[in-house]
Image: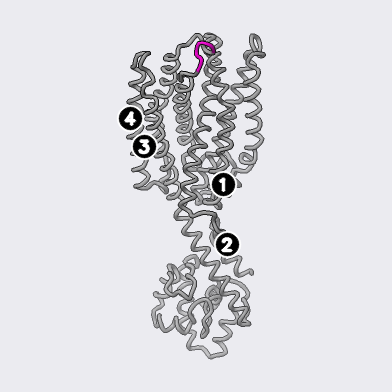
Amino acid sequence: MTNLMIYLTAGAFLPRDLELPLPLNGWELEIILVALFLLHILFVNLMVGGSLLTVLFEILGLTWPKYDDLARRIGATITVNKSLAVVLGVGPLLAINLLYTTYFYSANALTGYAWMGLIPLIILVFLLTYLHKYTWDRWTGPKKKRHIGVGVASAFLFLSIPLVFLSNINLMLFPDQWSEVAGFFSSLQIGNVFPRYFHFLMASLALTGLFLAGWFGRKRFPVEEHLPQFTRPELRRLFYRVAFYVTLAQVVFGPLLLLTLPSIGVTVTLVLVISAGVVVASIVMVLLWSELRSSDARIGRFYAPILVIFAVVVVFMGTGRHVYREASVEDHRQKMASRSDAFRAVSLAAHMRLDAGMSLGEGLAMGPTGKSVFKNCAACHAFDRVLAGPSIVEVQEIYAGDIEGIVTWAKNPGKKRDQFAPMPSFAHLGEEKLQLVAEYILEMGQEKPEEQTEATTES
């Protein structure tokens, strides 16, 4: 067991995979993850954007009372969007747990208290949101600032919670940097957390603007009763402006996000997907500008096409996010697969040696001689018997006089025969030790039979 543990922990932060069957094919889970995440993030955007606009308009209402009424109507949508965001968040959370188990849980553990504090923070922000919603008529006059304070606290928490989630999702993409993380705040220095966060905020306000343009602009909404100081076209135009100018700000935040992405996950496919999304987004901008320039009688005629085309943009961006995530962890996944193959090979060899009545040996110690280094090989290779790999006799026939051939194979082995598990790489031993063991392997045939037996059984 000591041999096995030393061997498996030779690479820091490189565990073997958990070989458990998935309930669906990987590609099916990927589709589910992207689709459910987009639904979830839609209502998260509306929740966050709604809380920001509610606070903004309530503050404006201190000077212009009509905006206080508008803030109240926007605030009434937050609790509904919050509930939908929570319910729709279960699906993508389960999918990401299945597809990225090692990465997701490792990121959660590394951010520590911030991740564990999410549940109480979510409970607190929900209570504050309901308090803000149901005290609108009671906290007026001298108490108005108290009411605004509750709204500000609620909005601040709504801004903070996505930052914790985003830092975790970002952190899971860079396992080679996990050793540098010591809690939540240090995780913010990995990758490009803040450009992604600002992009998320702009998207939240843009989506909320589009939503409210339709919500207050629909024919069934009683504008005269609830917002008598506004007209329906005026409300449409107001929220179209929010959506237009915030989307225009993405001209800055979009390239900033793309340019600050760590290169590990940037591929041609990603650039093509994002570029296609930008082209489609430009159509949305043209339609929004046309709406803003329309007369009161004609404003709103492009609302449905804007929503459809904006949805296409969101699909492109969500797909791009997934493409980057897959590319980022691909190299580490391959290394984990190699580690898993190595574990299977060592496990199989150990069982075969035990079944043959042979000792597992004292350990995978790395000594200065070829004989001591050979202990790394003896778990799978006996002198004249087939264990988990070819016998030494056969290796000598293949590599007669070719020390460099053995070294090259040991550093980058492959799979040649169906009856043997893939050999793991021993590049971590270093060139010097591999030279020693290669020489020892080729010389073993010159030893006396009892010495040959000792060399294999000892290890």
Number of the label disc, if any, that sits on residue 9:
2
Is residue 189 visible from the viewing direction of this image? yes
Contact check, label 3 and label 4, Cβ < 8 Å: no
SS class, disc 1: helix
Q: Is residue 254 shown above or below 28?
A: above
Q: Residues within 10 Å of mark 2 (few under 14, many from 20)?
A: few
**Are circles 3 and 1 on residues that touch, CB within 8 Å?**
no
Asked if residue 70 lies in the magenta stretch, the reply is no
Binning the other alpha carbons within 10 Å of mark 1 as few (below 14), some (14 to 19) or many (20 upward) gives few
Mark number, residue 277: 3
Tell me where residue 155 sits by quadrant: top right
Disc 1 from disc 4: Cα separation: 35 Å
Q: From where the camera sits, is residue 369 visible?
A: no
Identity of the amino acid at label 1?
Answer: Leu
Q: Amino acid at mark 2?
A: Thr
Q: Earlier in the sequence, mark 3 or mark 2?
A: 2
Furthest residue toward front: 220
Mark pair 3, 4: CA separation: 10 Å
Q: Position of residue 231 (x, y in %)?
A: 45, 11
Q: Which mark is residue 94?
A: 1
Res. 173 mark:
none
Q: Which residue is mark 4?
A: 283
Precedes in sequence: disc 3 or disc 1:
1
Discs 3/1, front: 1
Q: Tag 2 or tag 4, which sits nearer the N-term?
A: 2
State which mark lies toward you, 3 or 2: 3
Three-letter code, disc 3: Gly
* Amino acid type of the residue tagged 4 in the rendering: Ile
